[in-house]
Image: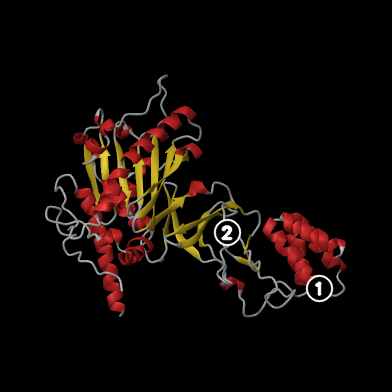
Amino acid sequence: MSDLDARLIAAHEAGDKPALVTLYTEAADVANDVDAACFYLTHAYVFALDAGHPAAATLHARLVAQGRES
Amino acid sequence: MSTVTDLSNVRTGVEHANGLPNAHYIDPGVYAEERQAVLFDQWAGLAVASDVPEPGDAKPLEFLGMPLLLIRDKEGEVRVFQNICRHRGMILVEKPRKIEGAIRCPYHSWCYSTRGKLVSTPHVGGPGHNTHDAIRRDELGLNEVRSHIWRDVVWINVSGTAAPFEDVHADLIRRWSEFDLPLHHGGTDSTFELPVNTNWKLAVENYCESYHLPWVHPGLNSYSRLEDHYHIEKPDAYSGQGTMVYRQLTDEAGRKFPDFADVGAKWNEQAEYIAVYPNVLLGVHRDHAFAIILEPKGPEQTLEHVHLYYSVPDTDDALRARNTEQWKLVFEEDIFVVEGMQKGRHVQGFDGGRFSPVMDSPTHCFHAWVAGQVEAHRSTAKAAE
């Protein structure tokens, strides 16, 4: 298990939504292809929406730019 | 097939009428019929707006088995939604909490704004694809239940078919227009619940009339005698009682609650207690008010939610606690009566009872309304067959 996976699992267990936003964004940034990146960006965006996190607008824009969100 | 009760003698004049038949208090089929006719089709009390004081506050509630979500949206408006996701019907909010951003379904994470708009449908078009032509977000917002706030009570019309609240209750709104002033909930020490083993209607029926006061509330006798009370009756809308000798609560130091500003001299010693059909009991006085929401929990169970209000946000803690205690005592004194009448509804052959033509007319007014709503519902159902 990668360090990132471990940190994601820990953040899920703790219900730490700001950390989930950060970690899924990180996972998107290091993903090998656009589909994988958009999968992680989606999770980052959803947790940002859930938490009212200021990153939601940026994440939304990144998904829109890839044609994955409206 | 539900039991079809004979209501032919309920709506006749109070001198000759019988009360509602037993089945209206104990029969699950009639309970289900009334759920639609008398509660879902009307403006029923669900909760109070003070339950969600801040934007984002959300409180899941169950109303006659239906999961609902009471929420104050980010703009401060109180709304009621069906508490289920439009995707798979999953319960959205399990416990009262603050919605920081969006309402996220815990199942597949569809997200809704606090105004009910569907804002995110993750992976709906496949992994990482969050849109699909077939899933039109503007058609899949949370289903909102029609609601209206009056005197802090959140009234809902589940069927969406009732006339506007302001029309249905125009007369009462006008009657109490002098009290159309800001109400300040007394806070956690000014709310309590009373679980009662009774059909909710018996709590209404008891509340409507003053006939029982000297017998059930002898403590009131010293200053509030039967002859100091008057009936309040508005057929098809509300009924209750008023008193001409309201005395303000005063502590040892002579302190009282401040009056509602400009409420008028008429209310110096007058107070009114009105059952707003179907299930809300309201009281107004020069210096405080209360609302009781009767939550039907089954044919023979009711949860009474009591809330006390004042004219200003900050009142004396001890005086407020004393007032809560005083009202709690009065409402608890009524429990043996409504539970006793409930037990009595299991006597086969009971004819629904008779009314004092002089003292029971507000209660008869409620029976007649219930019977009228049930009969109208039956007529509609029959016409649809």
Chain letter, disc 1 residue: A
Q: Residue furthest left?
A: B16
Is disc 2 surrounded by few (<14), some (14 to 19) or many (20+) residues within 10 Å? many
Residue found at x 31% / y 31%: B268
Quadrant in which the N terminus of chain A is drawn: bottom right
Q: Nearer the viewer, residue A25 or B191?
A: B191
Q: Position of residue B370 (x, y in %)?
A: 27, 59
Quadrant in the picture for residue B6: bottom left
Measured Cα–Cα span from mark 1 to mark 2: 30 Å
Colour treatment of the image: secondary structure
Q: Give the SS element for disc 2.
A: loop
**Chain hosting mark 2:** B
Q: Which residue is mark 2?
A: B93
Residue under the image location 30 percent in, 44 percent down: B336
**Amino acid at pointer 1:** Ala
Could you say which disc has been placed on residue A36 in the image?
1
Q: Amino acid at mark 2?
A: Val
Is label 1 on the same chain as label 2? no
Horizontal side of residue A41 vs B336, given as left or right: right
Using the rendered image of the protein, determine whether residue B190 is visible from the camera's viewpoint. yes
Foreground of the two, B167 or B247: B247
